[in-house]
Image (spheres, rainbow, N blue to C red):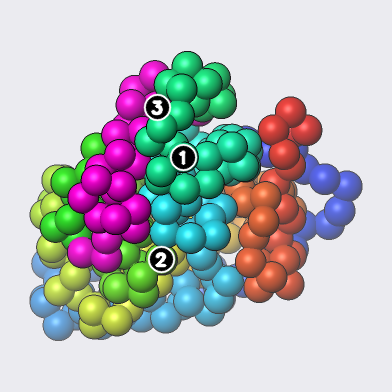
């Protein structure tokens, strides 16, 4: 699930919390920046404090795919590979209007589905996946999305990341979504040194209570998309800068850093066409429909 650039509307950007962003070299994690070891107890405390800080900054964090039921979320998550959530959200209204159920999509004309999915890229492979998983749902699960990890990962195009997105957000079953943003940030923060998704998932899960796993994923992903960018992190506007061993890798000047913020933190439209009301209440702007960007 990649990010999409958005144009700034004619409105003032919301203010970003500036707590503890002025501390040089990430004061609370300076020993890590210097290469000094961190005890297990200290790591857990630091990680959980960062979680609490991010929860305050993103109380409206949510999955950034539009969906109304488990089937829609499953399909949308599969489609999000190698494209943006925005492009998926702009594409799925037409798909679900024509094929609202697994039975409908399983029986669809592949060429018609390909045409709808063309904007998401890799549309032929994605058509095979969503039609294949729809057929499997009909034949093996009575047309219903299963609520177990072991069943979900057997479906065409569904891996652990997709399965945890569905379990956490459609069934309320905690899971860690080790997507690109999540893996990048937890390594940058030295929560783990692992590089494989399953190892990262396993190591991070030991730092937090299971009940926090789904929201942890949302908070970290939100932060990675809005402030802690891969190439130019906005360190000077980061609410967890004092706890970050990588503080200083990006722009530390608060005013310059503010210009790097994205989505609601920078006054830009978000990725969902139909975001939760809490997102709107915190200054979020719905994304435009396909062709209206």
According to the picture, the residue beneath numbered tag 3 turns out to be: 127
Mark 1 residue element: helix
For the magenta stretch, what is the residue range? 120-148
**SS for dot 2:** helix
User: Which label's residue is closer to the chain start, 2 or 1?
Assistant: 1
Cβ–Cβ under 8 Å for marks 3 and 2: no
| Residue 166 sits in quarter | bottom left
Query: Any mark on residue 104, and which?
Result: 1
Dividing the image into 4 quarters, which one contains the C terminus?
top right
Place residue 30 in its image quadrant.
bottom left
Label located before the other in sequence (3 or 2): 3
Q: Which of marks 3 and 1 is in front?
A: 1
**Main secondary structure of the magenta stretch:** helix
Q: Residue placed at 38% from the left, 50% from the top?
A: 74
Q: Which of 104 and 51 is in front in this view?
A: 104
Image quarter of the N terminus: top left
The residue sitting at 29% across, 34% down in the picture is 132
Rate crowding at label 1 as few (under 14), some (14 to 19) or many (20 or more) other CA atoms within 10 Å: some
* Residue at mark 2: 170
Q: Tell me residue 173's x, y (percent).
A: 30, 73
């Amino acid at each position: 699930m990649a990010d999409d650039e958005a144009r700034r509307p004619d409105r003032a950007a919301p203010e970003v919390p500036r707590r503890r962003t002025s501390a040089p070299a990430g004061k609370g994690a300076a020993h890590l920046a210097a290469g000094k070891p961190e005890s297990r107890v200290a790591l857990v405390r630091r990680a959980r404090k960062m979680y609490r800080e991010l929860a305050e900054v993103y109380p409206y964090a949510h999955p950034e795919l539009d969906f109304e039921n488990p089937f829609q979320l499953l399909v949308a998550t599969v489609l999000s590979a190698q494209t943006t959530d925005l492009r998926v959200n702009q594409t799925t209204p037409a798909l679900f209007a024509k094929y609202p159920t697994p039975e409908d999509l399983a029986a669809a004309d592949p060429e018609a589905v390909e045409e709808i999915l063309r904007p998401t890229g890799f549309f032929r492979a994605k058509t095979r996946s969503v039609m294949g998983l729809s057929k499997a749902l009909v034949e093996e699960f009575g047309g219903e999305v299963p609520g177990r990890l072991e069943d979900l990962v057997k479906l065409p195009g569904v891996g652990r990341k997709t399965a945890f997105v569905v379990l956490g957000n459609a069934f309320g079953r905690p899971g860690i979504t080790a997507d690109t943003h999540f893996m990048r940030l937890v390594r940058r923060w030295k929560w783990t040194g692992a590089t494989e998704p399953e190892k990262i998932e396993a190591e991070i899960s030991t730092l937090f209570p299971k009940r926090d796993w789904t929201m942890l994923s949302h908070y970290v992903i939100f932060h990675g998309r809005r402030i802690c960018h891969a190439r130019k992190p906005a360190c000077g506007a980061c609410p967890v800068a004092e706890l970050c061993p990588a503080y200083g890798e990006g722009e530390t000047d608060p005013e310059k850093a503010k210009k790097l913020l994205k989505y609601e933190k920078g006054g830009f439209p978000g990725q969902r066409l139909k975001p939760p009301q809490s997102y709107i209440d915190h200054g979020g702007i719905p994304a435009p429909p396909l062709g209206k960007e």
